[in-house]
Every structure is written in C-alpha cells, then in structure tokens.
Amino acid sequence: MAKKGQKYRRHSLEFKQMVVLARVEGGVSLNHICQSYKLNSDNVIKWTRRYLAGEPLEMPRGRPKTRIATNLTLPQTEEGLRAENERLKAELAFKDELIKLLEERARVKKKTDSKSCNN
C-alpha cells in the first residue's frame, strides 16, 4: 500500500521491453533485474507474462469508458415498430391495472383499520 504523498513510478514501454528481453532472452535472473533497476518482482513477472502471451505491455490508464447500450437492436421495419408499439401498450395497460389493484387494496385496508380503531 502506498504511503501518504507517495508517487508511483511510471515506466516507458521501451524500458519494460528492455527488462523483459533481458529476462527472457538474456537469461538474467529475476532478483538481479529487480535489484539493478529497483523494481518490484511482481511488476517484472506481470510484464513477462504479458510479453509471452502476446499482450501489450502498456495498459490503458484510467477508468474504462462506459458504452451506451450499443447492443440494442431497433426494429427497422414498419411491422417491427407496430409489434413493439403493441407490446409497450400491453405493458402499460398491465401496470395501470396493477396500480388500480394496489390502490383498491390500500383503500380496503384503510377502511378495516379505521373500523377496528373506532371500536
């Protein structure tokens, strides 16, 4: 964990490639590389794994941008639009009926509660 006010070091892509190539192709030990460049062994291992897997050594900085529902497919035909319209109407009618039912239950409950309080 970082100490208060501590700055993290940022290493260039060229530096990372040099360290990884020294380890992989040069046969230099992990401890020697870490002591020579004052690096954490976890970073060197992570860079080496990425290099061997063919992944980029540079990772994008910051929080990934959120995508706005790009996977929604909009109906392109008139028939599709009519079908979606009917579905939405049915959904709205169902919600209206549900609201009426809940309001009726609340009225009945209120009446029974007020009668029991008067006795």
Image (tube, grey):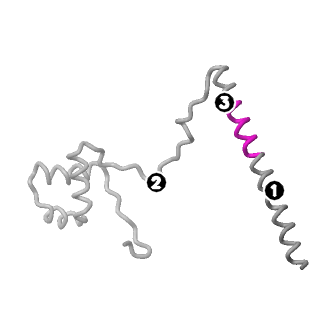
Residue 86 part of the magenta segment:
yes
For this rendering, which residue is in front, 40 or 80?
Answer: 80
Q: Quadrant of residue 30?
A: bottom left
Residue 61 got which mark? none
Residue depicted at x 20% and y 51%: 18
Local packing at callout 1 (Cα closer than 10 Å; few below 14, some 14-19, many 20+) is few
Local packing at callout 2 (Cα closer than 10 Å; few below 14, some 14-19, many 20+) is few
> Badge 2 is on which residue?
62
Please provide percent x and percent y for residue 16.
25, 52
Q: Quadrant of residue 104?
A: bottom right
Q: Amino acid at mark 3?
A: Glu
Q: Amino acid at mark 1?
A: Glu
Where are the magenta residues, as a range?
A: 85-96
Point out the tag, 2 or 3, that comes first from the N-terminus. Answer: 2
Residue 35 part of the magenta segment:
no
Asked if 8 appears above or below 90 in the picture, the reply is below
Give the CA separation, mark 1 to mark 3: 29 Å
Q: Are marks 2 and 1 in contact (CB under 8 Å)?
A: no
For this rendering, which residue is in front, 55 or 77?
Answer: 77
> Badge 3 is on which residue?
84
Residue depicted at x 89% and y 79%: 119
Please provide percent x and percent y for residue 27.
8, 54
Point out the tag, 2 or 1, that comes first from the N-terminus. Answer: 2
Q: Main secondary structure of the magenta part?
A: helix
